[in-house]
Image (cartoon, rainbow, N blue to C red):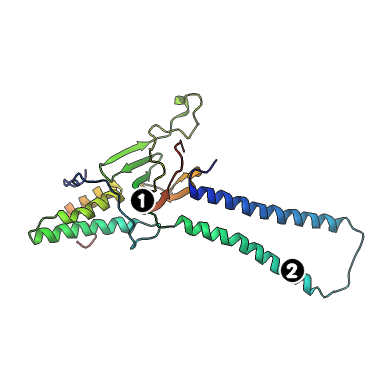
Amino acid sequence: MLDTQKPPRKKWWTPPFDPRFPNQNQTRNCYQNFLDYQRCVKTMSRRGKNSEPCEYYFRVYTSLCPTSWVQHWNEQIKDGTFAGKI
Amino acid sequence: QNAASPIMEELIAFHDHALMIIFLISSLVLYIISLMLTTKLTHTSTMNAQEIEMIWTILPAMILIMIALPSLRILYMTDEFNKPYLTLKAIGHQWYWSYEYSDYEDLAFDSYIMPTYFLEPGEFRLLEVDNRTTLPMEADIRVLISSQDVLHSWAVPSLGVKTDAIPGRLNQAMVASMRPGLY
Protein backbone atom coordinates (compact mmCIF):
# COMPACT_ATOMS: atom_id res chain seq x y z
CA MET A 1 0.00 0.00 0.00
CA LEU A 2 1.05 3.59 -0.46
CA ASP A 3 1.88 6.06 2.29
CA THR A 4 -0.65 6.47 5.01
CA GLN A 5 -1.14 10.04 3.81
CA LYS A 6 -4.03 10.19 1.36
CA PRO A 7 -4.57 13.23 -0.84
CA PRO A 8 -7.28 15.57 0.45
CA ARG A 9 -10.63 15.34 -1.33
CA LYS A 10 -10.43 18.36 -3.59
CA LYS A 11 -11.11 19.20 -7.20
CA TRP A 12 -9.89 16.64 -9.71
CA TRP A 13 -6.69 17.37 -11.56
CA THR A 14 -3.87 15.56 -13.26
CA PRO A 15 -0.19 16.57 -13.21
CA PRO A 16 0.26 19.44 -15.66
CA PHE A 17 2.88 19.65 -18.35
CA ASP A 18 6.30 20.03 -16.71
CA PRO A 19 8.68 21.99 -18.96
CA ARG A 20 11.67 20.44 -17.19
CA PHE A 21 10.71 17.14 -18.80
CA PRO A 22 9.24 17.94 -22.20
CA ASN A 23 10.17 14.73 -23.97
CA GLN A 24 8.81 11.25 -24.12
CA ASN A 25 10.88 9.88 -21.27
CA GLN A 26 9.03 10.78 -18.10
CA THR A 27 10.97 8.51 -15.72
CA ARG A 28 12.92 11.41 -14.33
CA ASN A 29 9.72 13.42 -13.83
CA CYS A 30 8.27 10.70 -11.62
CA TYR A 31 11.51 10.15 -9.69
CA GLN A 32 12.18 13.85 -9.20
CA ASN A 33 8.73 14.45 -7.70
CA PHE A 34 9.16 11.50 -5.38
CA LEU A 35 12.50 12.88 -4.19
CA ASP A 36 11.03 16.36 -3.84
CA TYR A 37 8.21 15.00 -1.68
CA GLN A 38 10.57 13.10 0.62
CA ARG A 39 12.88 16.10 0.97
CA CYS A 40 9.94 18.45 1.57
CA VAL A 41 8.49 16.25 4.31
CA LYS A 42 11.91 15.85 5.94
CA THR A 43 12.57 19.60 5.90
CA MET A 44 9.10 20.53 7.14
CA SER A 45 9.20 18.06 9.99
CA ARG A 46 12.68 19.21 10.91
CA ARG A 47 11.39 22.77 11.15
CA GLY A 48 8.30 21.60 13.00
CA LYS A 49 5.89 22.82 10.32
CA ASN A 50 2.89 21.18 8.74
CA SER A 51 3.70 19.16 5.63
CA GLU A 52 0.57 20.25 3.77
CA PRO A 53 2.49 22.13 1.00
CA CYS A 54 4.23 18.85 0.18
CA GLU A 55 0.89 17.43 -0.96
CA TYR A 56 1.46 18.74 -4.49
CA TYR A 57 4.53 16.52 -4.95
CA PHE A 58 2.66 13.60 -3.46
CA ARG A 59 -0.23 14.00 -5.93
CA VAL A 60 2.13 14.33 -8.87
CA TYR A 61 4.22 11.29 -8.10
CA THR A 62 1.24 9.08 -7.28
CA SER A 63 -0.25 10.04 -10.64
CA LEU A 64 2.91 9.50 -12.61
CA CYS A 65 4.76 6.62 -10.96
CA PRO A 66 3.65 3.02 -11.20
CA THR A 67 2.58 1.84 -7.74
CA SER A 68 5.08 -1.00 -7.82
CA TRP A 69 7.94 1.49 -8.13
CA VAL A 70 6.58 3.60 -5.26
CA GLN A 71 6.18 0.56 -3.01
CA HIS A 72 9.71 -0.57 -3.84
CA TRP A 73 11.17 2.86 -3.06
CA ASN A 74 9.20 3.16 0.18
CA GLU A 75 10.50 -0.20 1.32
CA GLN A 76 14.01 0.88 0.48
CA ILE A 77 13.57 4.07 2.47
CA LYS A 78 12.34 2.05 5.43
CA ASP A 79 15.30 -0.30 5.14
CA GLY A 80 17.69 2.58 4.66
CA THR A 81 18.87 1.32 1.26
CA PHE A 82 17.31 4.03 -0.91
CA ALA A 83 19.87 5.31 -3.39
CA GLY A 84 18.57 8.85 -3.83
CA LYS A 85 19.72 11.85 -1.84
CA ILE A 86 17.00 12.80 0.64
CA GLN B 1 -8.98 0.93 -39.69
CA ASN B 2 -10.57 4.32 -39.74
CA ALA B 3 -8.91 7.15 -37.89
CA ALA B 4 -10.33 8.05 -34.53
CA SER B 5 -7.97 10.81 -33.54
CA PRO B 6 -6.75 13.96 -35.32
CA ILE B 7 -3.17 12.72 -35.47
CA MET B 8 -4.19 9.45 -37.06
CA GLU B 9 -6.13 11.38 -39.70
CA GLU B 10 -2.99 13.31 -40.55
CA LEU B 11 -0.96 10.11 -40.66
CA ILE B 12 -3.41 8.45 -43.03
CA ALA B 13 -3.44 11.53 -45.29
CA PHE B 14 0.35 11.61 -45.35
CA HIS B 15 0.48 7.90 -46.11
CA ASP B 16 -1.88 8.41 -49.08
CA HIS B 17 0.23 11.33 -50.30
CA ALA B 18 3.50 9.40 -50.11
CA LEU B 19 1.94 6.32 -51.69
CA MET B 20 0.67 8.37 -54.63
CA ILE B 21 4.17 9.68 -55.24
CA ILE B 22 5.52 6.15 -55.07
CA PHE B 23 2.96 4.92 -57.61
CA LEU B 24 3.84 7.83 -59.87
CA ILE B 25 7.55 7.11 -59.81
CA SER B 26 7.24 3.35 -60.19
CA SER B 27 4.81 3.61 -63.09
CA LEU B 28 7.11 6.12 -64.79
CA VAL B 29 10.06 3.79 -64.37
CA LEU B 30 8.14 0.77 -65.65
CA TYR B 31 6.97 2.72 -68.68
CA ILE B 32 10.48 3.84 -69.52
CA ILE B 33 11.78 0.29 -69.11
CA SER B 34 9.13 -1.00 -71.49
CA LEU B 35 10.07 1.70 -73.98
CA MET B 36 13.74 0.80 -73.72
CA LEU B 37 13.09 -2.88 -74.27
CA THR B 38 10.80 -2.52 -77.28
CA THR B 39 12.82 -0.36 -79.60
CA LYS B 40 15.20 -1.24 -82.38
CA LEU B 41 17.11 2.06 -82.23
CA THR B 42 20.55 2.15 -80.70
CA HIS B 43 22.84 5.02 -79.77
CA THR B 44 26.36 4.19 -78.78
CA SER B 45 28.30 7.40 -79.24
CA THR B 46 29.10 9.39 -76.16
CA MET B 47 27.08 12.47 -75.71
CA ASN B 48 26.91 15.53 -73.58
CA ALA B 49 23.74 15.16 -71.56
CA GLN B 50 23.92 18.19 -69.34
CA GLU B 51 20.25 19.24 -69.52
CA ILE B 52 18.69 15.90 -68.79
CA GLU B 53 21.08 15.29 -65.93
CA MET B 54 20.02 18.62 -64.47
CA ILE B 55 16.35 17.57 -64.74
CA TRP B 56 16.76 14.21 -63.13
CA THR B 57 18.69 15.68 -60.23
CA ILE B 58 16.45 18.62 -59.49
CA LEU B 59 13.15 16.77 -59.92
CA PRO B 60 13.80 14.01 -57.34
CA ALA B 61 15.14 16.63 -54.94
CA MET B 62 11.85 18.49 -55.22
CA ILE B 63 9.86 15.28 -54.80
CA LEU B 64 11.80 14.47 -51.66
CA ILE B 65 11.17 17.92 -50.25
CA MET B 66 7.45 17.45 -50.98
CA ILE B 67 7.52 14.24 -48.97
CA ALA B 68 9.69 15.54 -46.14
CA LEU B 69 7.76 18.68 -45.28
CA PRO B 70 4.43 17.03 -44.33
CA SER B 71 6.38 14.29 -42.60
CA LEU B 72 8.21 16.72 -40.34
CA ARG B 73 5.00 18.63 -39.68
CA ILE B 74 3.30 15.49 -38.41
CA LEU B 75 6.37 14.51 -36.42
CA TYR B 76 6.32 17.77 -34.50
CA MET B 77 2.55 17.60 -34.15
CA THR B 78 2.82 14.33 -32.26
CA ASP B 79 5.12 15.98 -29.74
CA GLU B 80 3.00 19.03 -29.12
CA PHE B 81 2.52 20.38 -25.66
CA ASN B 82 -1.05 19.54 -24.60
CA LYS B 83 -2.69 19.91 -21.25
CA PRO B 84 -3.66 16.40 -20.25
CA TYR B 85 -7.04 15.84 -18.70
CA LEU B 86 -6.28 12.43 -17.23
CA THR B 87 -3.27 10.22 -16.65
CA LEU B 88 -3.40 6.51 -17.32
CA LYS B 89 -0.53 4.14 -16.57
CA ALA B 90 -0.24 1.01 -18.70
CA ILE B 91 2.24 -1.50 -17.34
CA GLY B 92 3.16 -4.56 -19.32
CA HIS B 93 3.63 -7.97 -17.78
CA GLN B 94 4.01 -11.41 -19.22
CA TRP B 95 1.36 -11.83 -20.53
CA TYR B 96 -1.15 -9.18 -19.56
CA TRP B 97 -1.44 -5.44 -19.08
CA SER B 98 -2.24 -3.75 -15.84
CA TYR B 99 -3.78 -0.30 -15.88
CA GLU B 100 -3.67 2.27 -13.10
CA TYR B 101 -5.70 5.43 -12.73
CA SER B 102 -4.05 7.19 -9.79
CA ASP B 103 -5.04 10.82 -10.12
CA TYR B 104 -7.68 10.67 -7.46
CA GLU B 105 -8.22 7.24 -6.00
CA ASP B 106 -5.92 4.28 -6.52
CA LEU B 107 -7.71 2.33 -9.18
CA ALA B 108 -5.75 -0.50 -10.73
CA PHE B 109 -6.77 -3.62 -12.60
CA ASP B 110 -5.29 -6.34 -14.78
CA SER B 111 -6.43 -6.99 -18.29
CA TYR B 112 -5.97 -10.47 -19.74
CA ILE B 113 -6.78 -11.64 -23.26
CA MET B 114 -9.97 -13.67 -23.38
CA PRO B 115 -9.16 -17.29 -24.18
CA THR B 116 -10.68 -18.34 -27.46
CA TYR B 117 -13.06 -20.87 -25.95
CA PHE B 118 -14.69 -18.14 -23.84
CA LEU B 119 -15.51 -15.85 -26.75
CA GLU B 120 -19.09 -15.12 -27.74
CA PRO B 121 -19.94 -15.13 -31.48
CA GLY B 122 -19.02 -11.80 -33.00
CA GLU B 123 -16.11 -11.07 -30.68
CA PHE B 124 -12.56 -10.70 -31.97
CA ARG B 125 -10.14 -13.55 -31.31
CA LEU B 126 -7.01 -12.49 -29.42
CA LEU B 127 -8.28 -8.91 -29.15
CA GLU B 128 -10.99 -9.19 -26.51
CA VAL B 129 -9.97 -8.72 -22.91
CA ASP B 130 -11.67 -9.44 -19.66
CA ASN B 131 -11.40 -5.91 -18.21
CA ARG B 132 -11.54 -3.12 -20.76
CA THR B 133 -9.87 0.22 -20.18
CA THR B 134 -12.40 3.04 -20.25
CA LEU B 135 -11.36 6.55 -21.20
CA PRO B 136 -13.29 9.79 -21.77
CA MET B 137 -13.60 10.92 -25.39
CA GLU B 138 -12.54 14.30 -26.77
CA ALA B 139 -10.11 14.70 -23.89
CA ASP B 140 -6.33 14.69 -24.08
CA ILE B 141 -5.14 11.77 -22.06
CA ARG B 142 -1.57 11.23 -21.03
CA VAL B 143 -0.69 7.53 -21.15
CA LEU B 144 2.47 6.52 -19.31
CA ILE B 145 3.73 3.18 -20.49
CA SER B 146 6.19 0.98 -18.72
CA SER B 147 6.90 -2.66 -18.16
CA GLN B 148 7.51 -4.93 -15.23
CA ASP B 149 9.59 -7.62 -16.87
CA VAL B 150 10.52 -7.64 -20.57
CA LEU B 151 10.06 -5.25 -23.47
CA HIS B 152 6.47 -4.84 -24.59
CA SER B 153 4.73 -2.39 -26.87
CA TRP B 154 1.39 -0.64 -26.36
CA ALA B 155 -0.50 0.29 -29.50
CA VAL B 156 -3.98 1.44 -30.52
CA PRO B 157 -3.98 1.57 -34.35
CA SER B 158 -6.98 3.80 -34.94
CA LEU B 159 -5.69 6.40 -32.49
CA GLY B 160 -2.26 6.36 -34.11
CA VAL B 161 -0.31 5.45 -30.98
CA LYS B 162 2.36 2.83 -30.54
CA THR B 163 4.89 3.16 -27.77
CA ASP B 164 7.40 0.70 -26.38
CA ALA B 165 7.09 -0.45 -22.81
CA ILE B 166 10.59 -0.67 -21.36
CA PRO B 167 11.29 -1.84 -17.81
CA GLY B 168 12.68 1.01 -15.78
CA ARG B 169 11.54 3.70 -18.17
CA LEU B 170 8.28 5.61 -18.34
CA ASN B 171 7.25 6.57 -21.87
CA GLN B 172 4.60 9.18 -22.42
CA ALA B 173 2.07 9.14 -25.25
CA MET B 174 -0.91 11.45 -25.77
CA VAL B 175 -4.21 9.95 -26.79
CA ALA B 176 -7.29 11.87 -27.90
CA SER B 177 -10.22 10.08 -29.51
CA MET B 178 -12.86 12.00 -31.43
CA ARG B 179 -15.70 9.55 -31.17
CA PRO B 180 -17.01 7.00 -28.69
CA GLY B 181 -16.23 3.43 -29.61
CA LEU B 182 -14.24 0.31 -28.95
CA TYR B 183 -10.62 0.63 -30.03
**Residue A16 seen by the camera:** yes
Write the residue at 22% across / 52% down.
A58
Give left or right: position of B109 versus A35: right
What residue did someone put label 1 on?
B84
**Percent position (x, y) of residue B4?**
49, 43
Q: Is residue B114 above or below residue A29?
A: above
Amino acid at the residue labelled 2: Ile
Q: Nearer the viewer, residue B149 or B86?
A: B86
Label 2: chain letter: B
What residue did someone put label 2 on?
B55
**Percent position (x, y) of residue A21?**
35, 61
What whole-number distance in Å separates the C-alpha atoms at marks 1 and 2? 49 Å
**Percent position (x, y) of residue A82?**
22, 57
**Residue B165 seen by the camera:** no
- Which residue is outermost to the left? A48
Write the residue at 71% across / 69% down.
B57
**Percent position (x, y) of residue B1?**
55, 40
